[in-house]
Image (cartoon, helix red, strand yellow):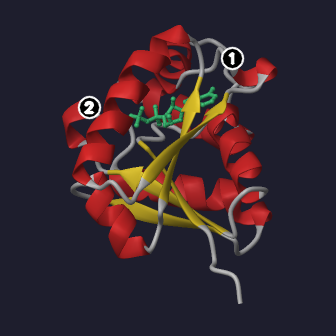
Amino acid sequence: MTERRTGLYPGTFDPITFGHLDIIERSVKVFDLVIVGVAVNAGKGPLFDIDERVAQVRVEVAGLGDRVVVERLDGLLIQFAKAQGASVIIRGLRAVSDFDYEFQMSSMNAKLAPDIDTICLMASDRYQFIASRLVKEIAALGGDVSAFVPARIAKRLVDRLSRGA
Ligand code: ADP
C-alpha cells in the first residue's frame, strides 16, 4: 500500500479569497489529503476572529469533498504539521514580493524540521492580484469585492464593515 500524502496549507485567510480557493483546488490534485490550517494570528489583528474564519473556510471548501479538511492552527507551524501527519507545507506565490518572505519562511522551517518540505504553487493568472488585505480595504471603502471573494464572504465583509468596526 502506498503512503497517503498529506499537505498542509496554512494561512490567515482573513478572509478566504478566490486565490486561496484556487490553491486548495489545485493542491487536491497533488495530495491525498489537504489540511487547510487557519492560523489564529492574533498579532495580525484579523478582521474576522479565528472561529469565524474556520467556519467561513469550511463552508467555502465544502464542495471539494472529504479530501479537504479545515483545522484551527495555533502555535508553531511545523509542530502542527507533524501532529497532523503532514510532510509538506503548501504555499501560494503571487508576485516577486511574496518570494522573499516565503523563501525565508521555508528555509527556517527546513532548519527546524528537515523532514518537512515546502511546496509553492504559482498563483493562477486570473487570481494573482488578489490579496485579503486589499479586499478588506476595498470593502471598507464601499467597493464591490464580488470578483475576488465568494458571495457569502463579500456579504460578511459588507455586514462587518458597515457596522463601522
Ligand atoms: P499568511 O498570513 O500566512 O500570508 P494568507 O491568508 O495571506 O496567510 O495567505 C496564505 C497563503 O496563500 C500564502 O502562501 C499566500 O502567498 C497565498 N496566497 C494569498 N493570496 C493568493 C492568491 N491570490 N493566489 C495564490 N496564492 C495566494
Where 55 sits versus 3, above or below? above
Q: CA distance from mark 1 to mark 2?
A: 24 Å
Is residue 83 or residue 126 the one in the foreground?
83
What element does badge 2 sit on?
helix
> In terms of image quadrants, where is residue 151?
top right
Q: Where does residue 124 sit, x and y in percent of width and height? A: 76, 26
Q: Where does residue 152 sit, x and y in percent of width and height? A: 67, 44
Is residue 47 or residue 83 the one in the foreground?
83
What element does badge 1 sit on?
loop
Q: Amino acid at mark 2?
A: Lys
Q: Which residue is mark 1?
A: 144
Is residue 90 or residue 11 the one in the foreground?
90
State the residue at coordinates (73%, 56%): 30
State the residue at coordinates (68%, 58%): 61
Where 72 sits versus 121, above or below? below
On the question of residue 94 being in view, the answer is: yes
State the residue at coordinates (25%, 32%): 45
Rendered image: mark on residue 20: none
Q: Where does residue 50 sit, x and y in percent of width and height? A: 35, 53
Circle 1/circle 2 CB separation < 8 Å: no
> In terms of image quadrants, where is residue 122?
top right
State how many labels appear: 2
Camera-side mark, 1 or 2: 2
Q: Mark 2 near ligand 1 (CB under 8 Å)? A: yes
Q: Which residue is mark 2?
A: 44
Q: Is residue 79 left or right of residue 132?
A: left
Q: Amino acid at mark 1?
A: Asp
Q: Where does residue 19 sit, x and y in percent of width and height? A: 67, 32
On the question of residue 165 being in view, the answer is: no
Instruction: Name the residue at the bottom extreme.
Output: 1
> In terms of image quadrants, where is residue 64?
bottom right
